[in-house]
């Protein structure tokens, strides 16, 4: 591990020099590429230097314990040594995580799809609340949310909503949200005060670029039709809505939120690419699963990943056994405690796999 860290540090120093080179500075493309590579290595290098500083501190403390004749000073040095050794162990663990292979999708924007499941109107109301939860979380992260399509229920909920979330490392924070989200509460329409259980499905897909998924013109059929629902005078008068069918996989995507057919087509293609990319990823994961056990909770949509219990003011993530009695905060978009716990858990699982590999 440390030989690899030395190589990373040497590469970091080389990139630091390049960033000061007039040749690199004068070429914006090269400069951006070099700056990104430098930025990617910096957390590892900083942590490695911290590790070395702690090692030197430990050596100094041990030397003081051996040479010091004053009992109080030896006791102080021993206390300092214990503290430094604990910090060293924690720093080494952090270095191992930083050296894990990066998920190439972590930097990407995501396509978020939420659909009401079992529970009728109550499920659509919960789908709308969960979408608001993610909208508020995105605000705290300064991410941009753009709704691509949505379908409202008669009670003001959402039967389905598809949106793109754009920003810094969106997928790295959102990727563990895929799955079935269950709600337990007394619906507003319930006169007996009974708790009902409803469910929705959440899918979080990395947005695929053209280089990730190449869609041939011969493989798609594009149909246009009149928009329906809110939209003013243009509704049902212009063929602005678009339906794209990917013929090899029979994947169908519709978009009618925009008045412009061109804009609807662009949005639909973004969703189509993300769905096809997800299919390819699923194939790769399936192949890996035959060779070794996959991590618990892979984001399969058929699996219940989280329960929101309103009477008990709790949210439970079943994959990691985490329960928080802060349901109001979570629904208000304060998802970071959940996100951090999930990231830490799955990083630990990856470390175990690296050791076993």
Image: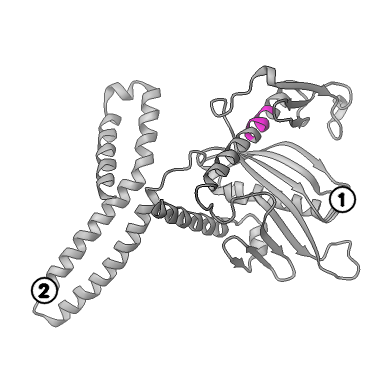
From the top left corner, tell me how far across and down residue 145 is, in percent. Answer: 64, 40
Nearest-to-viewer mark from 1 and 2: 2
From the top left corner, tell me how far across and down residue 105 is, in percent. Answer: 52, 39
Specify start and end residues of the magenta stretch as a single range.
Answer: 269-274
Residue 271 lies in the magenta-colored region:
yes
Question: Residue placed at 39% from the left, 23% from the top?
Answer: 28
Q: Is residue 11 left or right of residue 114?
A: left
Q: Please state which of residues 85 and 288 is positioned toward the viewer in this rendering.
A: 288
Residue 175 lies in the magenta-colored region:
no
**Figure quadrant of residue 142:** top right
Q: Is residue 60 left or right of residue 156?
A: left
Dot label at residue 155: 1
Q: Residues within 10 Å of mark 1 (few under 14, many from 20)?
A: few
290 to 249, vertically: above or below: below
In three-dimensional space, the C-alpha distance between marks 1 and 2, rounded to whole angstroms, equals: 76 Å
Q: Residues within 10 Å of mark 2 (few under 14, many from 20)?
A: few
């Amino acid at each position: 591990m440390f030989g690899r860290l030395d190589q990373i540090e040497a590469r970091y120093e080389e990139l630091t020099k390049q960033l000061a080179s007039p040749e690199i500075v004068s070429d914006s493309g090269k400069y951006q590429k070099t700056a990104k590579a430098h930025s990617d290595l910096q957390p590892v290098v900083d942590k490695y230097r911290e590790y070395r500083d702690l090692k030197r501190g430990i050596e100094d403390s041990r030397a003081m314990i051996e040479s010091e004749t004053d009992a109080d000073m030896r006791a102080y040095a021993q206390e300092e040594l214990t503290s430094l050794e604990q910090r060293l162990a924690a720093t080494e663990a952090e270095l191992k995580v930083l050296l894990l292979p990066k998920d190439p999708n972590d930097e990407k924007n995501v396509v978020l799809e939420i659909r009401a499941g079992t529970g009728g109107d109550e499920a659509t109301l919960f789908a709308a609340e969960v979408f608001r939860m993610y909208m508020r979380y995105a605000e705290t992260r300064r991410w941009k949310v753009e709704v691509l399509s949505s379908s409202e229920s008669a009670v003001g909920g959402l039967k389905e909503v598809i949106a793109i979330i754009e920003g810094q490392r969106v997928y790295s924070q959102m990727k563990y949200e895929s799955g079935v989200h269950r709600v337990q509460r007394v619906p507003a329409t319930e006169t007996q005060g009974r708790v009902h259980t409803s469910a929705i499905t959440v899918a979080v897909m990395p947005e695929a670029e053209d280089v990730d998924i190449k869609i041939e013109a011969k493989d798609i059929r594009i149909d246009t039709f009149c928009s329906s629902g809110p939209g003013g005078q243009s509704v049902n008068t212009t063929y602005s809505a678009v339906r794209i069918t990917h013929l090899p996989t029979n994947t169908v995507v519709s978009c009618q939120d925009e008045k412009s057919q061109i804009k609807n087509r662009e949005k639909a293609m973004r969703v189509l690419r993300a769905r096809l990319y997800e299919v390819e990823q699923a194939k790769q994961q399936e192949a890996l699963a035959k060779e070794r056990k996959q991590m618990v909770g892979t984001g399969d949509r058929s699996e219940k990943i989280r329960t929101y219990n309103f009477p008990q003011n709790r949210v439970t993530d079943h994959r990691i056994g985490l329960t928080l009695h802060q349901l109001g905060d979570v629904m208000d978009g304060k998802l970071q405690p959940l996100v951090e716990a999930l990231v830490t858990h799955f990083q630990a699982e990856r470390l175990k796999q690296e050791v076993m590999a």
